[in-house]
Image: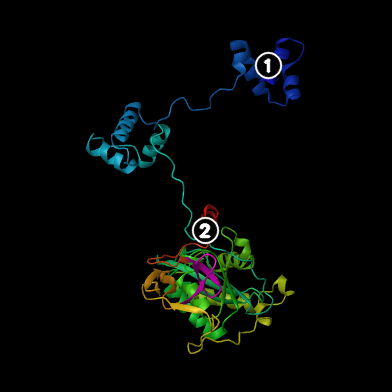
Amino acid sequence: MEQRIRFASLAESGQFEVKELCASFGISRKTGHKWLARYRAEGAKGLADRSRAPKCVANRTEAEVERLIVSEKRLHPTWGPKKLRWVLETKHGMERPPAVSTLGEVLKRHGLVKARKRRGGLFTVERGTLTPPERCNHVLGVDFKGNFALGDGERCDPLTVSDLHSRFLLKAEAMPDMTVRWTQGAFKTLFRKNGIPEIIRVDNGSPFASGGPGGLSKLSVWWIGLGIEVQFSRPGCPQDNGCHERMHRTMKNECCKPASVNRYAQQQRFDRWRKEFNEERPHESLGMRVPADVYQPSARRLDGRIKPRLYDPETETRRVSSGGFIALNGNTCYVGESFVGAEVAIERSEETGLLAVRYANVKLGWMEQSPNARLRPPAYAERWEKKLAARTDET
């Protein structure tokens, strides 16, 4: 504001040209003449900032309709925009009532609704550090590339699996959906052919993870039961699986645009491209060698007769029933349907009196030694210790 007044004063003094003043103040001649015209017409007040809002809005909600919305909301405080729109149609006979989003904005302007605070997940998953791959079959990167529509209209969800040490692409399969059933079947075939890895690295989406205890899904529980360590990347951090995501970009550009006419044709393109990626395309990280020159299959094959040992012999365990419950002290406790058929370990704490529940090396939660106890998040133990400490101080 001070600069504008100074500019107008110097221009009106007659000692300077407007062109020179505009160059000195770093503004265009058009802007300079605009400020000068406002100063001559209204004085210093004319140099103040003006509203940039349009003078008229064609689709603005009429004041009468807005008052009607507010009055109906006050009559029905618990009703939302969808119900209020129905009231405008049926009760007031309005042929073209405002959209649901417009009704929501009207209620916000009048302070009749409050934004809900999004509640975080009950179980906060503890994510450890990611292991850098040091050898073949040490760490496998697993992910679903973004889905797309095929020529016949069907959905295609490409499942990709790569060895992060050799960059060897083990699987690029056009899946019909991202369910546990299809994904587990694809991994059974892969494990029989290429063997079982030491670690599988996945993101926090379905079907690899869940919002339940330990963040484990049925698929990740099955992997751990085979003796595979499952590592989850940080939420919203695709760089944790960077080389796999980089492969996705190449895959998308070379064999997904445009999509094939059907799933069979798309799978043929995936197979041809995977062969080229593994046997012809050199990689800088491998010293310009191809992945096929580095990769070696794992010696561990999938065998249902051999089950790895998840717990020490003296560990107290409970088998999870078909409903996701375990029996404890004559009562049942819900653990989760992801663990159906698996065995979970029970560890008793003499200090707090709580029972720690874990699956392999994954902490699931805590339980009280009381009837109808339920599984609580791992952070519950800290609150319980503070409560016991407070009771001790009182006594």
3 or 71, nearer to the observer:
71
Residue 5 badge: 1
Q: Compared with residue 271, is residue 82 higher up or lower down, i.e. above or below?
A: above
Q: Position of residue 177 (x, y in %)?
A: 43, 69
Farthest residue, direction top: 13
What x and y, as percent, mark residue 122? 47, 58
Residue matched to label 2 = 388
Observer-side mark, 1 or 2, equals 2
Q: Secondary structure at mark 2?
A: helix
Three-letter amino acid code at the position of disc 1: Ile
Q: Residue furthest bottom?
A: 305
Q: Nearer the viewer, residue 203 or 277?
A: 203
Check disc 2: other Cα within 10 Å, few if <14, some if 14-19, many if 20+: some
Residue 351 painted magenta: yes
Q: Which mark is residue 154?
A: none
318 and 230: which one is in front? Answer: 318
Question: Chief secondary structure of the magenta span?
Answer: strand
Who's the residue at 68% across and 81% down the image? 294
